[in-house]
Every structure is written in C-alpha cells, then in structure tokens.
Image (spheres, rainbow, N blue to C red):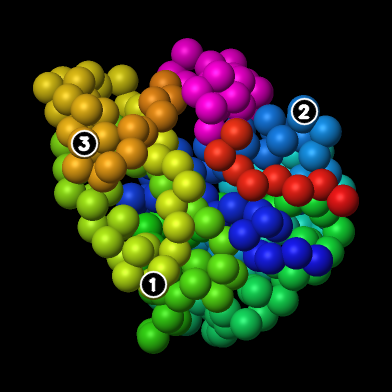
Amino acid sequence: MGRPSDRGVLVVGTDTGVGKTVIAAGLAWALARGGVDVGVMKPVQTGCSGRGMSDASSLMAASGTTDPLDDVSPARLRAPLAPWIAAEREGVRLSIPSLVRTFARLAARHDYVVVEGVGGLMVPLTPTRTTLDLAAALGLPLILVIANRLGAINHTLLTLHAATSRGLHVRALILNHPTRGRGSAERTNERAIGRLAGQRPSVVDHRRAGPRIWEWVGRQLERDGVMAKLAVRTR
C-alpha cells in the first residue's frame, strides 16, 4: 500500500475557523481534476446541527467521492465544542485507533486521501489525546492553514513547534483570509511568517469566490505550486 506519507495529507489549522474545510476541499477538487482517485475524511466533526452544508459534505462534493458518510466522517457530534467535551455530553467514546482504521480503509480504496483535522493540533479528542496524537498515529504530512489576522505569527510558530516535536513534516503553509479585514497585521504576516518559519506561505483569498468555492481555491493552489508539493502516487 505504500508508506503513509504517500497515501495522503492532513490539513490542520492554527485555530478553529481558519478555513481548513475550504482548503481541504480545494485540494481534493484539484487532485480529482488531475486524474487522482482521491478520498476525503473528516475524522471528528462537532457542531453537526443538520442545517447547512457540513464539513464532510463539502469535502465529498468537492472530491466527487461515493464513500459512505460513516467512513468519511465517522464521529459526528452535535455540540459546537471541543471534541472531548462534545463526545462526553453524548456518551460517545472517541478512539484514535478506530479513526486510524477508518483512514486505512479509505486509503485502500483510493490513490490518495485528504484528511481534514479538528481545530488546532492541541484540541483534545479525549482527556489524554489531542489532534496532534491523531496526526502522529496517521503518519501523514501536514498542510498548515493559518488565519491571516493579528496573532497569526505566534499561532504559526507554536503549531510548527508542536508538529516538529513529534517528527511531523509540514509540507506547505497556507495563509488564508477568513474575513474582509485588512489591517497592518494582515499586510505584514506573509513576510514575517515566511522569514520566521523558513518557508513562504501560499496566500489564499476566497472572499470573492462563488458557491463552488473549492474550485476557485483549488485553482489558486495549483497556480501557487501547492499541489506539486504533495507526494501523490497513483496505482
């Protein structure tokens, strides 16, 4: 089946609400457009109210996958809280080994799997395990999505420190504009992060994109060379 790093990528964020779903969907769409048999996964999803398009449904629409929802999104929780708290309220036990087994099933069906993480790397999935532990168990390289706002530099460097402390490889940084604000921080973050992190972030601004936002984002990622950084091996 190949090494885990050949089988997919994990999209993580510096925080919640930074645009992970939009970026993950754009990656999946661009891979599918390039002829890759791509699967998608949102291992844990909170705030599943049943209203509007969920993270999992966005990923499925962008990739065109027909995998069962229970494989794409095996843990769907109603409360918009940290996964551990939301799961505890519903009497659900989250298990990293179980999530890894679900990923393995998807990886066996597809050339490549785009996995969207949960919040930041230190978000608790259980009382003793975090998204960082899930990332290490999956063994996938990371795409780090950064919200372009005040605090982005600190959040980026902390996330990179956490990732490298576990031996995880960050394949690309993506500086995303989640709001219309464009002050001094938003104008200077790209240069500062590039210098301090040792790699230039790609900049994505999807505020003018239409309803099929993943296509617009996917084309941006293609133009900026992000797709070329993914070690995709087809069968």
Q: Nearer the viewer, residue 23 or 190?
A: 190
- Element under label 1? loop
Which residue matches tag 1? 166
Disc 2 to disc 3, how far (Cα)?
A: 33 Å
Q: Which residue occupies the extreme left position in the image? A: 184
Residue 161 belongs to the span the image colors magenta: no
* Residue placed under numbered mark 2 in the picture: 33
Kindly identify the amino acid type of the residue bearing the numbered disc 2: Arg
Element at label 3: helix
Spatial CA span between label 1 and label 2: 33 Å
- Under tag 2, what secondary structure? helix
Q: Percent from the top left, x then y, of residue 26?
A: 61, 33
The boundaries of the magenta stretch are: 206-227
Q: Residue 209 colored magenta?
A: yes
- Numbered mark located on residue 195 in the image: 3
Question: Given the image, on which type of amino acid does mark 1 rest?
Answer: Arg
Q: Residue at x 39, y 26 (%)?
A: 203
Left or right: residue 229 versus residue 176 is: right
**Badge 1 local density, few (<14 within 10 Å), some, or many (20+)?**
few
Residue closest to the eye, 92 or 33: 33
